[in-house]
Image: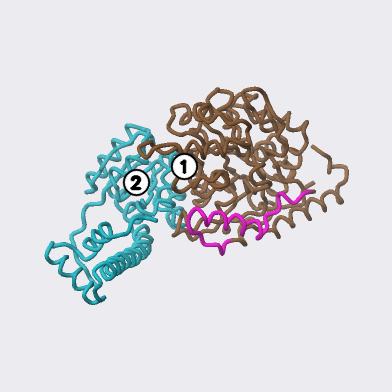
Chain colours: A cyan, B brown
Amino acid sequence: MTTTSVPAPVSILLVDDQTERAAMVADQLSAAGYNLLAKLSSAEGLLFQVEKHRPDIVLIDIESPDRDILESLSVINQHNPTPVAMFSARGGSEFITSAVEAGVSAYMAEGLSAERVAPAIEIAMAQFRSYQHLRQSLQRTQQQLDERKIIERAKGLLMARKNISEQAAHQTLRTLAMNSNSTMRHVAEQIVTHLQAPAQ
Amino acid sequence: MSSLQAEKPNLKLLYLRLTDSAPLIIARELGLFERYGMNVELQRETSWATLRDKLIGGAADAAAMLAPMPLTLKQTLPHCEEELLSGLILSCNGNGITLSRSLHDQLQPATSDAIGTALKQFIFRRTEGDTPLTFASVYPFASHTLQLRHWLSHAGINPDSDVRLLVLPPEQMVDHLRRGDIDGFCVGEPWNTLAVQEGIGIIATPSNTLMPAMPEKVLAVTRSWHDTNPATHLALRAALLEACGWLSDRDHRRDAIGILARADYLDLPEDTVAASLNDQLLHPEGPVQNTGWHLFAHPQSDHGRPTEKKARELLALCNEIAPVDTNTAQLFCADLYQQTLDYLRHQQVATPRQARTV
């Protein structure tokens, strides 16, 4: 149950069209021990950049018109979900507090400091993780189903083509996997590719 | 005249640079907010997520919001404990699907009805190495995405596998089309009209011919704000429903054009705002009449009534984009709408001379 591993530093993609502010935020993120992957001035190529860098979190100015693009990534793209945190040059601290309480990832006001950046990112990450956990367990179940399906299919093909029993087919797959230092799934995929009848 | 005691007379309302933000702008310009005891500041935003989050965070009191947005809050902000609700659908329709001029020229459709079929044939003629055609809408759970997907599916194009769909802010659509980053989009007006006027786009279809009277923008508030300010909420709905009714008049719409176009509102040329508000579909050869492009709420019609049935229909469509929790239909509050109607009628009876048309 308790798997212990050393956590890698949280990697961040920063989107802000104000160069000075971006530089300041970047400095503070580095000082707080975060791994800054890239600084973007706007969402031009944002979709591509997220694919490329696979950040743990995207930091974006709340006023940025590109926030909807990021939101579509986290809502629609099940393969590459990204938590979204925001900071704002405007807006008082009350707004930020209530927004965080309401569950809107994280907002950060002017006068950013390393001490304030870290907790805000932690809140956003924690919220994301619980959501992510649900998605991953669904994904794992799907993968296991897929794996079982392909192995069953390979066994079926072996049984039909070689006229052998289910048990013998299973044994064949296992032996092939061991001999080629590969997984059952991989061997099964190869068998299916080689043996499957051409489409009729 | 107002017997309403607004709990909070000074309000901030949020909107985007779109023709259907008109009820907010008109209510302000005609002094309707003042008439119902409120002093309202309008604030223009550039992104739907920002508009929503400012509302949730309490940085604003109400907003003209995409109709599916309050219903799908759990999907976009899974940890948000606040709810968004609506007692008024401000408008129906108002969007269009536009293709780039270059794509349209390659399709060479015989009629405008044939664009979809021509697009399908074009897509299936392409070879595997070609980059897929890319279309944009303005937000994942928005009528725009639903309409675009519907239009593509209807033409026999699979929106999930035959093309690439992405999200862009409304005011960046035309620039992205010009740069060739996208081949088409579904966006609210006046951005379709602008693409035609700049000679880079052809409107394939307005949204009202695709899915007639689909709820487009709602007046949204948070549940906690509504609980604290019920009378203010009623006053707000009354002022906005009156503004919506005013906008139903053709002559009034002509007056509205100049106001909407101003730098402090949409900041666009008047003839850009004029087309869709006058129900004119721009084509390179000239305008075509398109009745009902913007259908604003009206006390005498049902377009403004947010019913659970309408919410469920929207949710069912959203569910085709990504799985959504469909137990949010009661966030469309028909009872609040009815309360507004009752209040307006009572006002008319009580003060007949003041119940004038504006």
| Mark 2 burial class by Cα count in 10 Å: few <14, some 14-19, many 20+ | many
Helix, strand or loop: magenta stretch: loop
User: In the rendering, at what x and y percent does residue A25 appear?
Assistant: 30, 40
* Chain of residue at mark 1: B
Decide whether residue B326 is among the magenta residues.
yes
Q: Is B66 in front, or is B32?
A: B66
Picture quarter with the N terminus of chain A: bottom left
Residue B349 visible in the picture:
yes
Left/right placement of residue B306 relative to residue A42 reads right
| Mark 1 burial class by Cα count in 10 Å: few <14, some 14-19, many 20+ | many
Query: Amino acid under label 2?
Result: Val
User: In the rendering, at what x and y percent does residue A26 appear?
Assistant: 27, 40
- Vertically, is B239 above or below A152? above
Answer with the quarter of the image where residue B132 lies: top left
* Chain of residue at mark 2: A
The residue wearing badge 2 is A58
SS under mark 1: strand
Q: Which residues are magenta?
A: B301-328
Tell me how far mark 1 sits from mark 2, CA to CA: 17 Å
Answer with the quarter of the image where residue A163 lies: bottom left
Closer to the observer: label 1 or label 2?
1
- Identify which residue is drawn at 32% across, 59% down: A197
User: In the rendering, at what x and y percent does residue B90 appear?
Assistant: 67, 46
The residue wearing badge 1 is B167
Query: Amino acid under label 1?
Result: Val
Q: Is B209 in front, or is B15?
A: B209
User: In the rendering, at what x and y percent does residue B211 appear?
Assistant: 64, 46
Left/right placement of residue A194 relative to residue B103 reads left
